[in-house]
Image (cartoon, helix red, strand yellow):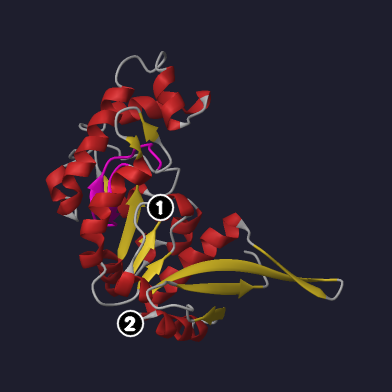
Amino acid sequence: MLVLLPPSEGKASAGRGAPLRMESLSLPGLSAAREAVLGELVDLCAGDPDENDKAREVLGLSEGLRGEVAKNAALRTAGARPAGEIYTGVLYDALGLASLDTAAKRRAARSLLVFSGLWGAVRVTDRIPSYRCSMGVKLPGLGALGAHWRTPMASVLPEVAGEGLVLDLRSAAYAAAWKPKGEVAGRTATVRVLHSQVVDGVERRSVVSHFNKATKGRIVRGLLTEGVAPKGPAELVEALRDLGYAVEAEPPAKAGRAWALDVVVTEIH
């Protein structure tokens, strides 16, 4: 099973420690594309952070986040930590990697892949510095990062996907960097979390962003904790139901397309 995750906008401080070693990152086929983004990002953010309005504009940062520019400028020398410790936020809080037992942590190291505007995709055990660069960024030289990553991802990811289930929990911006095709798409499942409420006797369903992320984190944690490794979308549906989720799904109308699963919940927490 391969689980595709979005990163978090907020990130923990890398702190002190050994700096990034690009050659140590997983998916070495992405190395050249990573180096291209890293090089331009560091150059863009170099200089006096109090005057670097261009970098803030490119990265979509508010005045209050000016310090993120200086962070990016120091990426080559900053301390690095496992990506699973760097990424924070709702999904990662619910996933709770640090509190998993030893066996579940091993499963997480094998099966979780976090997409990134800067790194393309990394394992949770890959050591990276804290940074600020979303997939929606358009760098002056490389252009839109979603498009930049498309070709190297298409070359590398099908092999990484192996022969089992691909559980795609990415947001739209990160999904644009790699879209499973053909046989891989046929064993890929996306998940949408819907909040169901009955109003005046009529059921109403809505997507709640915060809760959507939290539920996805809990889903992944449940699969890792129970040691469940579905081989395909149909088995995933049964596994999620065994974990207590209400799941609605139908096989795609055509071969070579991903399954779309709806997880319906009645309580938000």
Q: Which residue is drawn at the image coordinates 57% and 67% (left, top)?
A: 193
Question: Is 142 or 237 nearer to us in this picture?
Answer: 142
Q: Within the image, what quadrant is residue 97 found in?
A: bottom left
Asked if the magenta segment contains residue 102, the reply would be no
| Mark 1 element type | loop
Q: Within the image, what quadrant is residue 183 found in?
A: bottom left
Disc 1 marks which residue?
Answer: 176
Disc 2 marks which residue?
Answer: 231
Q: Which residue is drawn at the image coordinates 41% and 52% (left, top)?
A: 174
Disc with the residue nearer the chain's start (2 vs 1): 1
Mark 2 is on which residue type?
A: Lys
Quadrant the C terminus occupies: bottom right
Q: Position of residue 218 (x, y in %)?
A: 48, 68
Please give the range of residues in magenta.
Answer: 118-134
Indicate whether 49 appears above or below 158. Answer: above
Instruction: State left or right for residue 93 relative to residue 202.
Output: left
Going by the picture, which residue comes out furthest to the front?
A: 254
Given this view, does label 2 or label 1 mark the residue nearer the observer?
1
Mark 1 is on which residue type?
A: Ala
Asked if the magenta segment contains residue 131, the reply would be yes
Question: Is 1 or 30 nearer to us in this picture?
Answer: 30
Q: Position of residue 206 (x, y in %)?
A: 67, 63
Mark 1, other Cα within 10 Å: few <14 / some 14–19 / many ≥20: some
What is the number of the mark on residue 10? none
How far apart are labels 2 and 1 at the CA level?
A: 24 Å
Mark 2, other Cα within 10 Å: few <14 / some 14–19 / many ≥20: some
